[in-house]
Image (cartoon, rainbow, N blue to C red):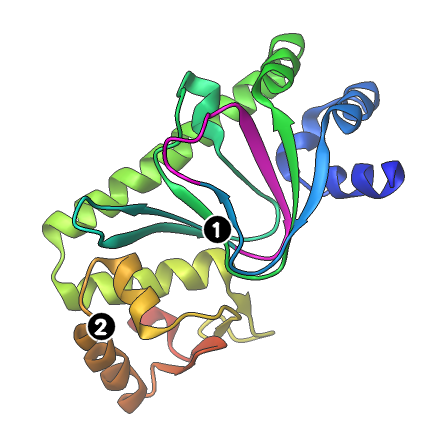
Amino acid sequence: MAQTKLWHLENFSMLHILTKQEMQALDKMAVMRNAPRNQVIYFPEDTSDTVFLLKQGKVKISRISEAGKEMILAILGPGEIFGELSITGQSKREEIAEATEDAVICSVSIADFQRMMEMNPKFNLQVTKFIGFRLKKIQSRLESLIFKTAEQRVRYLLKELAEEHGRQIINNPEERVVKMRLTHEDIAKLSATSRQTVTTVLNDLEKHGIISYDRSRIFVRKYSEL
């Protein structure tokens, strides 16, 4: 099991900056577990004392308004880290993290993670840059809500999914396949629009041959036209 866990950790690009000895130390600190589809990893108000590394599957990060409306902030894939705001001193979780596919997750206590950052300044800088990048993405999402129309938000989301989760078809930069289970309701929550708007936009994009969509994948045919 220890070798398996170390192999999982070695596949995170952020951790490549660690020395072999530091990787072995992190291996001893980390706890690896399976999270079946639809299992909640943490709720709002849970103690924020752990950083999570997603090796396999997909995890949805979302917030629920006082009126009970869900807004999906991100859908994360293998190789991504979440729960990272605990590093900045956040004491309680503010979002829900839920596995949308069967997932394999490594968790590290914030105390151990911060100790690794203190021991390795380059790793510290890498983590700081990552948090800054994640916050910049959130800011970009907020700007999209303010300045883009509902149709533009859906198109922007599809392009973002193609960039982050899409597999480019060989020798054709215009075509990308996003293998992700997303309903119209999920897309609406990600783009802060209505399900009816999503249905209208997707139908229009399919009609013009820009995408093909079903619940298990999005096939982008004309990436530059999104």
Bounds of the magenta segment: 43-58
The amino acid pointed to by label 2 is Arg
User: Which of labels 2 and 1 is toward the front?
Assistant: 1
Alpha carbon distance from label 2 to label 1 = 21 Å
Snapshot quadrant of residue 208: bottom left
When the figure is inspected, residue 204 is found, relative to residue 101, above or below; the finding is below
Residue 118 in the figure: left or right of residue 47? right
Quarter of the image containing the N terminus? top right
- Compared with 113, 149 (above or below) is below
Residue 55 pos. (x, y %):
66, 48
In the picture, the disc for residue 61 is none
Q: In the orientation shown, which residue stands out farthest toward the top? A: 118
Q: Residue at x 27, y 54 (%)?
A: 70
Position of residue 178 measured from the top left corner of the image (x, y, whole percent): 49, 69
78 vs 205, nearest the viewer: 78
Residue at (21% x, 61% y) in the render? 153
Residue 225: x %, y % from top left: 29, 73
Q: Residues within 10 Å of mark 2 (few under 14, many from 20)?
A: some
User: Mark 2 = which residue?
Assistant: 195
* Amino acid residing under circle 1: Glu
Q: Secondary structure at mark 2?
A: helix
Query: Does dot 1 land on a helix, a strand or a loop?
Result: strand
Magenta run includes residue 132: no
Disc 1 marks which residue?
Answer: 98
Q: Is residue 102 above or below residue 54?
A: below
